[in-house]
Image (tube, rainbow, N blue to C red):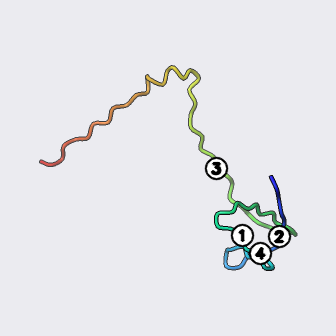
């Protein structure tokens, strides 16, 4: 992966890159904070899907959804 470094500042919650740099839309970027910052970032919460120890048991978890007729 090729990496190029630019400097910028945060203004109104958006990162503004210094200089005449135009990045194409949807370009992936990585932000690295420089200097001393006392940021309190919220903890990262990851909710993982459960994995079956035995995938062949998946058929035991089959559900049939039946909607009630509420037109009466």
Q: CA distance from mark 3 to mark 2?
A: 30 Å
The disc placed on residue 45 is 3
Q: Is residue 18 above or below residue 35?
A: below
Disc 2 versus disc 1: nearer the observer: 1
Disc 4 versus disc 2: nearer the observer: 4
Q: Residue at x 84, y 66 (%)?
A: 5
Q: Is residue 42 above or below residue 69?
A: below
Q: Are marks 1 and 4 in contact (CB under 8 Å)?
A: yes
Q: Is residue 12 above or below residue 53?
A: below
Q: CA distance from mark 4 to mark 3?
A: 34 Å
Local packing at callout 2 (Cα closer than 10 Å; few below 14, some 14-19, many 20+) is: few
Question: Mark 4 — residue?
Answer: 21
Question: Mark 1 — residue?
Answer: 23
Question: Mark 2 — residue?
Answer: 6
Disc 3 versus disc 1: nearer the observer: 1
Q: Secondary structure at mark 1?
A: loop
């Amino acid at each position: 992966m090729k990496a190029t470094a630019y400097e910028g500042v945060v203004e109104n919650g958006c990162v503004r890159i210094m200089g005449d740099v135009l990045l194409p839309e949807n370009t992936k970027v990585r932000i690295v904070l420089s200097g001393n910052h006392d940021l309190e970032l919220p903890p990262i919460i990851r909710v993982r899907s459960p994995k079956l120890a035995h995938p062949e048991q998946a058929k035991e978890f089959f559900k049939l959804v039946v909607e009630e007729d509420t037109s009466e």
